[in-house]
Amino acid sequence: MTKHGTCHIHKEIFFLIPLVFICEIAFSNTSSDDLSILDDSLFELSLEELMSIKVSVSSVQEETIFDTPSTVTVIDRSSIEKYHYTSIEEALDTVAGFDIYQTIIDRNVATARGILQNFYANKILLLIDNIPTWQPIYGEGSLERININDVEKIEVLKGPASVLYGSNAYTGVVNIVLKKPAKNSLSSYARVGEGDLLAAGLSIHHQFENLSFFSSIHSETQESETYQVPNKVGFEFNGETHFDYANYGQKNNLSLGLGYNAHSLYFNQFSYEHSFLGIHPAYVGGGGKNVEHQGHLLHYKYQNALSEQTDIIASLAYEYYKREFPVSPDYSLVLGLAGNRYASEIKLNYLKAQINIEYGMNAELRQSEGYNTFNGLTGEFVTSNLKDDDDVIEWSTFARLKYDIRDLSLLIGSRYTDNEKFGSNLSSRFSGVYTLQDNQSIKMIIGQSFRVPTMFELYFERPNIIGNPDLEPETSTSYELAYLYGGTHVFVQILAYYSIYENLIQRQLPETGIPSQYQNVNDFKGYGSEVELKYEHDATLGAYINYNHVSGVDEDIDNNYRYVPDHTVSFGLSKHFSYFSLSGKGKYISDVEGFLENIPSQFIASINVSKTHAFHDMSLRHVISIDNITNSKMLTPEYIRETENINELVTEDFGTRYSYSIYIDFY
């Protein structure tokens, strides 16, 4: 017998906050008795089970968040679905101590604990299943290369992590852990909404004895309403003081994975295109045109046991990155760069009784294929913008010793780095974790960080910006104390830290005017506190609130903390009813000093309504979302200090957005 179903979506639902969304669906040979509601699957993990999830971002041995020798925040799959995070950057922006900023050229610049990064996110290391990924010219990783529907959890390590991961883990690490279903599965989704929003994706996981395979492909495009942005003084076009601008973005990514016994192979290809304000910013500087990113990553890993106590992990990686953007309104001048990164690593891990010893070595070759200006209409070369750039070879060796004494776990480690251009560095780290009970612990962490200047910071040369080959590497030292508690319904993580930053690299504009130049700024100190609260009750009600405070010891003289909000608060609330689930999330940012005037406090909030069905080995979930129900512009400070006409920037959250998403999973 064949049954038919209908799905009614009334136009009015996009203009009211929906309370219930019911979509009737029926399949051939399926009776109503076969249908079950799966909204509970989003809540099926108790808080205690969530807290027992193992994390791997801070050591080679997976440990719970209570035992790991670092302060780590985990955004699990349940939270991603309950609060309907549609991107990795959206999820990260809820973490205490983490913020996602926008500059006149780049978007989704992840920052940790208030340390600004000028144009590019090169002080936080991005990992995909513990695989480092970043491009060699700017030194940044791209959050857009992974779609959040492929993610099982996001592990966020806050604070210096150079001892663990090398020079790019200066203020933190983000490890994106991909889904690894225990059985074969196929997942798909589609999303439509205002602003020409259109997104779709498909992923397949297959397991056959010792062989595993997965593939995924995703695409998304969206555009905001047009609004006006002021031209930089002196760069007006035909006397116009403003130019029309619309936030546009398109993301495409492909991932392939293959595993056989001790061997694994991973490939990722992505492209990301988005509008930007121009290098001045002004219409004649490319304002309103698009930046294009492309890249791919190939990684091989071998992991096996040499004995009952000793494991070996060896890996090889190749990464390529390319970026282009126009600096004229007619594409007659386009800036384009490309670079390669080759990396290898070998680690030995010895674990016996209370002792865990990890030792390893890695080596990297970073190559520039140039940063050139060319005619975008004819392809003709105009000039080179990287002067005297050269390949960079860096190698390091590291060792970590962990010793457990009853309820006390001690870890000490060091990494020796040798860079052919900047000599050697020795960074160390000490952690002590004292377990009060199985669900309570106190952590003390002392960590150091080290980051070498990028090729862009060293060798870039244009009339308005120049690099500085005399730059010194950035270093920092951080002292941290944290308390963690987990109960039946509540999880709490509270921490305080004090950090010293030396030789931080920032672009500065001299009093005499352009060109601006990268410089090592004076040493400065900062402190802060972070509070994370989670609540779950009766598998139907969930909530979180994350608070962050950051401040400089002397904000009047530094060029960093004075432009960073002192307080941010992120929160979320979810509730499962009989036939649907309702969730909301929001963020508050306190007022902050801007370049021209103070930027007032801001608040943004979103709401989602979802309903889930199950049919044998298939689940179907609908979500209606209203993003930015407060209609906030969400202005962010312009930190580059390059131009006097920009005090703040309108982010991608400009305006209220309505969207509908559908997720279909086969098992």
Image (cartoon, rainbow, N blue to C red):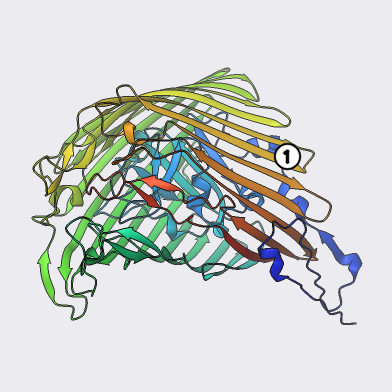
Question: What is the x, y in percent for residue 369?
Answer: 19, 63
Total labels: the figure holds 1
Picture quadrant where residue 450 is located: top left
From the viewer's side, name the closer residue of 667 and 114: 114
Q: Secondary structure at mark 1?
A: loop
Residue extending farthest to the front is 239
What's under tag 1, amino acid-wise? Answer: Ser
> Can residue 371 be seen here?
yes
Picture quadrant where residue 521 is located: top left
Disc 1: CA contacts within 10 A as few (<14), some (14-19) or many (>=20): some
From the viewer's side, name the closer residue of 643 and 236: 236
Quarter that holds the C terminus? bottom right
From the viewer's side, name the closer residue of 170 and 550: 550
In the image, residue 606 above or below residue 500: below
Picture quadrant where residue 185 is located: bottom right
> Can residue 313 be seen here?
no
User: For the point 44% across and 44% down, which residue is it?
Assistant: 174
Residue 515 as seen in the image, left or right of residue 546:
left
Question: What is the x, y in percent for residue 99?
Answer: 44, 42
Residue 273 as seen in the image, left or right of residue 189:
left
Q: Which residue is mark 1?
A: 46
In the image, residue 246 above or below residue 91: below
Residue 237 as seen in the image, left or right of residue 289:
left
Question: What is the x, y in percent for residue 307?
Answer: 49, 40
Question: What is the x, y in percent for residue 479?
Answer: 39, 22
User: For the point 19% across and 59% down, which residue is it?
Assistant: 368
